[in-house]
Amino acid sequence: MHTYIIRRILISIPLLFGLLTINFFLIHAAPGDPTDIFYNPDMDPEARENIRRIYGLDQPLGVQYLKYIQGVVLKFEFGYSIAKKRPVKDEILEALPNTIQLSALALLLELSLGIGIGILAAVKQQSTFDNATRVTSLTFYSMPSFYLGLVLLFLFAGGVSATHWFPASGMVDIVRHDSMSTLGRLGDRAIHIFLPSLTLGIGAAAGISRYMRGELLEVIRQDYMRTARAKGLTEKVVVFKHGLRNALMPIITIMGLSLPFLFSGAVIVEQVFGWPGMGRVAVDAAFQRDYSMFLAVNLIFGVMVVVGNLVADILYAIVDPRVRLS
Amino acid sequence: MNRIVRITSLGLFFTSLSCSPSSTPGDSPSDSAQRVIEVEARPDRGRSEEHNLEFEARWNELYNTPHDNGDTLVIGTIGDADSLNDLTSAAITGSNVIGLLFLSLTRTNPDFSHAPSLAESWQFSEDHLELTFHLRDDVFWHDGVKTTAHDVKFTFEKQISPNIGWATIKWKQFIKECVVVDDYTVKFIFERLYPYQLMDAVVGAVLPKHILEKVPDEEMVSTDFNRNPVGNGPYRFKVWKAQQYIEVEANENYFAGRPPLDRIIFKVVPDQENLALQLKSGEIDFMDGVPPRFFEELARQENLVAYIAPGRSYSYLGWNLLNPLFQSKKVRQALTMAINRQEIIDSLLFEFGEIPKGPVLPIIWAHHPNLPDFPYDPEKARQYLAEEGWKDSDGDGWLDKDGQRFSFTVKTNKGNQIREDILILVQDMFKEVGIEVRPNILEWTVFIGDMDKKDFEAAVAGWSVGLKMDMTTIWHSDSINDKFNFVSYSNPEFDRLNDAAIFEMDSEKAKQMWWRAQEMIAEDQPYTFLYSPKDINFVHRRFQNVQMETVGWNYNLEQWWVPKDKQKY
């Protein structure tokens, strides 16, 4: 298995390199350049030229590309952000953990809600619960996350004063957080992350619950399930031990593939809730034509896709003994 | 800044200049007080080199009256700052914070004249080419080192360095040299005489030489100081979390005495809807530039006070004069008369705006109050167009001339709802007179790229107005190619007047010239001047001594305070 993983990682290097190259030329081909943010009548064209020169934007594109690649490959340097006036690395190191935090919680919600509801719906097929969750999950599944976010904001973050239970933006109460007890801080973080992670996770949870229900129903009809029941095992053991393990396999694949979607979903959710993560960095970088920042962010999203796929394959091998990685 | 620069338009730098605080006690809202306060427009004395003793006395009143310390002010802002170093900052949030952390040589008074700050006094030489500042000797950097004339000279040298890229380098173009006379006396030597010498000399925050002299010019854009500034102002830098907030705390050693509020926090919030929500729920205490559509709901909130300030910007519909369609003055006048501007203001700005007749707004001393105007009159518009040969000869409802239909595209930028809505209204209004308009809404960078390349027929955009009277960059024919004369307005008579007026030392004569220049533009109608929005600000009512002025909402921010029994944090 180790050789398999190493080989997969080695294969992904040229892939990421290609991604970087394509993105580099794409973003440079887009109209405008990073000095557009200095666009104002008080700024002499001369001052703008100065800034272009300082950042090396006056050099031929090929030279800029070689310099950039050289920095990335030899020194693991991602350059300076023109819009943020700091090394790209610093900004990303500040934002990435926040996105991971949000996505991890959303993933947890997605899996626990999705799998839980799916199992219940399958076990109680055709019940009121099954029908009710079918309708609600379809509703959430088809609802765009920015819309859901705005609805939640309006309902629970100040739009309706009777149900103003959650803050409207940010990660912590910026005024009081530092003077809180440890427990208080934890609670403060929890109420801040709740709405964004719910918004991010619930659509995917709805999807998972439908897959889960379908797979489990499929498995329940198999012969070995009948055998298990015939052996006199309790229904609990039948469903959870024999049924669930088999039904979970496709879910793992779906989960691995959904990791990149989780991150791209975070881009939108972070905008709505002002969550200080990679999503906001990515959007700003694209609009401000902040080249180095844009490239680094896309590289990270690329790495996420590669890692997500790899993790799914490995988990698949662990859950299903018939699969051998070689 | 994203918000302002992208939305209100180009060039909010002007505002940042006025951001260093100054004063006016009095009308802060107490319990009984009114909850909507109109900010008074003051006569513009930006060219004045005299002290304004009335404003200075008002400024000092806080320090002579009892007040409480404590509490925190949370200011909501849409864009994060980019840098807290005046040399490298371009975003509006950054300049607001810099105004609290750093001192400039002078402060701006509500009438745009100058008040003492780091400099206690100043005087010009006989020939008016040398300007000497006498600095205070009791100002310390937040790390304990004294602020001296050497810092002033050092700052000037960095500002004009081509390897740093200070955005407002142009303001220093006529300053030949900055000379240290002694530790607390510094002299600026000018190349020529002009009315804004004092304003140009004091522009920009003074920076600490002992820290920044170690940074090579090329590395200024990425130096650690940008994010960990050491200033000498009323507040000192505490913490900056990217995309979250910037926090500053009271400077106990401030020369004028500790500012009342313990902390001021600039909180980054995703968008205007969210800002309004948080203002309502009390998560933030202050918001400037509130969109008019939120006014009514927020004004109903018991705990908020609204300040309505005269506009510092205007929006326009610009006609590309290189396009044959718009080359006739009469056609342009007709186009203006076809637009019901009052309806735009009433329906999109909820009446929080005025129709500007020309590019110089009433807050500026050179404003011409009686410009020729072309009020809404579709009948007359049709008549003017007919005189120019535009008639509906084939009866299809659209005007045509030589077989060509009167039809054009109007471009504007995405992200400003009012501008996007204007395109729809205008499309309807033009249809009334038989002109076909196609709206085209573009991403900001694409939009300004097209404007630069003159790749547009008509465009809706806006300007914010500087404190310095100068029409060169937007209207002079020299500015057509590489500056901001997008519409390619070219009028030799105007150029001549503008060039002379800039350097005219006699205010009365200068005013006559500027009036004449404005008349030309109003007559030529290269733009249809659409509206000048009022600036709506909301602040929590617990704050006392809030004095908003046209120079900026933060005119005396460092002097706001909260009585002990009302303190929230």
Image (spheres, coloured by chain):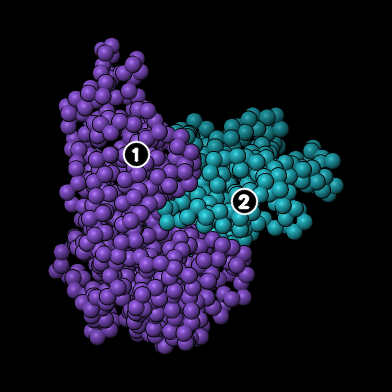
Chain colours: A cyan, B purple
Of residues A324 and B18, which is closer to you in this image? B18
**Direction from residue B543 to residue A31 in the image, left or right:** right
Whole-percent x, y for residue B321 in the image: 37, 35
Q: Looking at the image, is A187 positioned above or below residue B180?
A: above
Q: Residues within 10 Å of mark 2 (few under 14, many from 20)?
A: some
Whole-percent x, y for residue B399 in the image: 28, 20
What label sits on residue A57 in the rendered view? Answer: 2
Q: Is mark 1 on a helix, strand or loop?
A: strand
Of residues B497 and A188, which is closer to you in this image? B497
Residue ID at (50%, 49%)? A36
State the residue lying farthest toward the top.
B394
Chain name for mark 1:
B
Q: Quadrant of the N terminus of chain B?
A: bottom left
What label sits on residue B548 in the rendered view? Answer: none
**Is residue B302 visible in the rendered structure shown here?**
no
Whole-percent x, y for residue B245 in the image: 46, 64
**Direction from residue B40 to residue B203 in the image, left or right:** right
Say what amino acid the circle numbered 2 marks: Leu
Whole-percent x, y for residue A193 in the image: 48, 56
Q: Quadrant of the C terminus of chain B?
A: bottom left
Residue ID at (64%, 54%)? A56
Chain name for mark 2:
A
What is the distance, in whole Å, between disc 1 and disc 2 at their CAs?
31 Å
Q: Is mark 2 on a helix, strand or loop?
A: loop
Residue ID at (19%, 74%)? B26
Q: Residues within 10 Å of mark 1 (few under 14, many from 20)?
A: many
Residue ID at (34%, 19%)? B405
Residue located beneath label 1 in the image: B318
